[in-house]
Image (cartoon, helix red, strand yellow):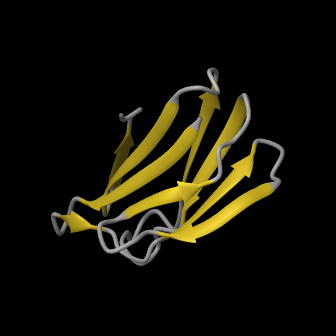
Amino acid sequence: MSLSTHVLDAASGRPAAGLPVRLENVDGTVLAERRTDDDGRVKDLPAPEIGIHRLTFETGDLSPFYPSVTIDFRVTDPAEHYHVPLLLSPYSYSTYRGS
């Protein structure tokens, strides 16, 4: 199993570089803290076990409304790759299971 994320700043049309990202278990145990690279990606997150996990993005520098965005997701198959992207605008965001 592997895990990655990608953050795009929809207002500027550019990757969100340098954005703090935290990976936690659903119980709040921090598994990793990283920053997005110049392409808005975090590729080296540790592979979480089966269960529910949380990615928190500190978005306050990009959004006047959302100081952070938290995405809970479920790992069901440890053999699969999980990609959890975030598309951020000043007053909205969206996510999906990527590939």
Left or right: 73, with 83 as reference point? right
Residue 66, image x, y percentages: 46, 62
| Image quadrant where residue 6 sits | bottom left
State whether residue 92 is above or below residue 18.
Answer: above
Q: Position of residue 19 (x, y in %)?
A: 45, 72
In the rendered image, residue 31, in percent from the top left (x then y), is placed at: 74, 56
Q: Nearer the viewer, residue 68 or 55?
A: 55
Residue 12 x/y as whole percent: 17, 69
Query: Which residue: 55% across, 41% down?
Result: 2
Q: Residue at x 15, y 63 (%)?
A: 13
The answer to which image quadrant residue 96 occupies is top left
Between residue 84 and residue 46, name the one nearer to us: 46
Residue at 84% of width from left, 44% of height from top? 27
Specify the quadrant that holds the C terminus: top left
Residue placed furthest toward the top = 76
Quarter of the image with the N terminus is top right
